[in-house]
């Protein structure tokens, strides 16, 4: 057996077009194309330039079409969650999709409180109360841009929109839909009570597809433009965290995962949602997963803190004609800095989207009577120490929610490459930490396609293949 699958993996800062190969019960991948996915400003609002992304996707597909001896079996798309795409009756964009960090959340948070009983919202959805949720964005649009809702006929998620461009078929993928805070976790459908205040209903969302189901095939136009054939497009766990969790080679029951990237998402995989007052007060979330699983987790600000700090340093270096500093060098500098000399509350809302992340971190430390970090190494160490401390806090919250102790943690994603952060996490949690694979979302994407194609038969088989295909590194607490 030698099969190839195309994984299109949209991250909140970078997208990758991956060619995955399944051969002799091992999976491998190569990155064929990569492009940035930062938002852009349009009339003082922050948006996603989805048509630029679409052009980049086609560049990646063309590169794959030019490769030799391929046995292509499918295409799958994953991306961040929560973002809605609004389409008119003619299936045109009703507006350029808003970035989940756009300022409309300011009005949205207040309007959501006016429209809904937040306790009841959690009872229906099981989703943590976050400012970036689609329910908040819808509330903000109702206040600031009600005309968008008036001309909207169909609503889908980011991966659904790109599946539509590939196939001509509109669909709603289950795992991403569950992130919106609009989806009934019990009925597995959009909740009419939460949609009614916006003048919409579940009929405004396309047919629901679950991971492993076929959505359609490449349209003739896309085939001609890319050089590919009539390849099937599958619904995979299209929320990138959902795909990443499939890519975690977990072997024990009492283990947790950490998908480490722009966001850090820490949680456990369970069979049924845990929706109770304890979970609501702890602000824990129940997101749908592939293979009838639930991702019981919590969002943590993640490496966004370092990414935005690095952007400030890069801008300064470019102005002064200096050298740009890489993430590896930042980690090396951080290792030389004293531990916990400065610590921030990483989930403080002031770090959600500040104009200057470096300045915001320094002001927090000054206001709290700590040593103010100044150099890139000091600020990086502050971020790493603070993340490790927050990971420990969140793990305790999850343990309280599920009622048992976690014995191991698996870290996947881009952040799993940082040796210092991995070791600090193991030290702080006091448990063994395992890292890899790095591109877990892309690997999970590929393997669910293989399941859809009939090449693997279960989640256990998928994880056995992943475990035997990639290097897994252990970090013991020191």
Image (cartoon, rainbow, N blue to C red):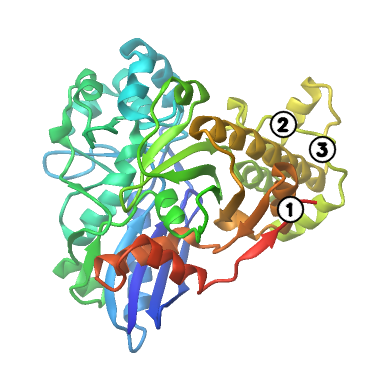
**Can see residue 66?**
yes
Relative vertical location of residue 416 with respect to residue 392 in this rendering, above or below: below
Distance CA(mark 1)–CA(mark 3): 14 Å
Residue closer to the observer: 464 or 315: 464
Determine which residue is flagged by label 2: 344
Picture quarter containing residue 187? top left
Residue closer to the observer: 424 or 186: 186
Determine which residue is flagged by label 1: 423
Residue closer to the observer: 93 or 213: 213
Q: Residue at x 59, y 71 (%)?
A: 471
* Numbered disc 2: secondary structure: loop
Q: Residue at x 21, y 68 (%)?
A: 232
Horizontally, is 180 left or right of 266 in the view?
left
Q: Residue at x 18, y 22 (%)?
A: 199
User: Residue 91: where, in percent of width, then height?
Assistant: 16, 45
Determine which residue is flagged by label 3: 340
Distance CA(mark 2)–CA(mark 3): 10 Å
Judge depth for marks 1 and 2 and give the one in front: 1
User: Residue 331: where, in percent of width, then height?
Assistant: 75, 55
* Numbered disc 3: secondary structure: loop
Judge depth for marks 1 and 3 and give the one in front: 1
User: Residue 343: where, in percent of width, then height?
Assistant: 76, 33
* Numbered disc 1: secondary structure: helix
């Amino acid at each position: 057996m030698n099969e190839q699958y195309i994984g299109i993996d949209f991250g909140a800062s970078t997208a990758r077009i991956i060619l995955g190969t399944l051969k002799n019960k091992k999976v491998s991948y190569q990155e064929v194309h990569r492009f940035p996915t930062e938002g852009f400003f349009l009339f003082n609002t922050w948006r996603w330039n989805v048509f630029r992304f679409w052009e980049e996707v086609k560049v990646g597909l063309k590169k794959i079409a030019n490769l030799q001896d391929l046995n292509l079996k499918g295409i799958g798309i994953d991306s961040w969650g929560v973002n809605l795409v609004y389409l008119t009756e003619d299936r045109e964009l009703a507006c350029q999709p808003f970035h989940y960090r756009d300022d409309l959340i300011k009005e949205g948070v207040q309007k959501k409180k006016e429209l809904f009983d937040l306790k009841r919202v959690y009872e229906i959805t099981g989703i943590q109360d976050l400012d970036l949720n689609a329910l908040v964005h819808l509330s903000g649009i109702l206040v600031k841009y009600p005309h968008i809702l008036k001309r909207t006929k169909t609503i889908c998620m980011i991966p659904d929109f790109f599946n539509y461009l590939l196939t001509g078929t509109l669909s709603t993928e289950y795992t991403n839909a569950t992130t919106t805070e609009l989806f009934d976790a019990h009925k597995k459908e959009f909740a009419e009570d939460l949609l009614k205040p916006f003048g919409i209903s579940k009929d405004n969302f396309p047919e629901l597809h679950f991971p492993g189901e076929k959505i359609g095939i490449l349209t003739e136009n896309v085939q001609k433009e890319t050089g590919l054939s009539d390849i099937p497009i599958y619904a995979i766990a299209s929320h990138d965290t959902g795909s990443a969790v499939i890519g975690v080679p977990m072997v024990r029951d009492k283990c947790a995962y950490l998908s480490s990237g722009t966001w850090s998402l820490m949680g456990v995989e369970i069979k049924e949602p845990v929706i109770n007052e304890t979970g609501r007060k702890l602000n824990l979330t129940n997101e749908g997963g592939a293979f009838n699983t639930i991702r019981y987790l919590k969002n943590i600000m993640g490496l966004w803190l370092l990414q935005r700090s690095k952007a400030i340093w890069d801008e300064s270096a470019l102005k002064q004609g200096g050298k740009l500093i890489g993430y590896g060098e930042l980690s090396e500098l951080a290792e030389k800095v004293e531990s916990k000399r400065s610590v921030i509350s990483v989930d403080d809302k002031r770090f959600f989207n500040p104009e200057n992340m470096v300045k915001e971190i320094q002001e927090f430390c000054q206001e709290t009577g700590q040593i103010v970090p100044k150099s890139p190494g000091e600020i990086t160490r502050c971020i790493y120490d603070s993340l490790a401390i927050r990971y420990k806090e969140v793990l305790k919250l999850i343990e309280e929610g599920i009622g048992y102790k976690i014995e191991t943690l698996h870290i996947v994603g881009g952040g799993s490459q940082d040796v210092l952060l991995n070791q600090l996490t193991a030290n702080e949690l006091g448990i063994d930490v395992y890292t890899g694979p790095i591109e877990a979302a892309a690997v999970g994407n590929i393997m669910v396609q293989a399941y859809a194609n009939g090449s693997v038969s279960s989640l256990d088989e998928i994880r056995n293949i992943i475990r035997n295909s990639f290097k897994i590194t252990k970090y013991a607490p020191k």
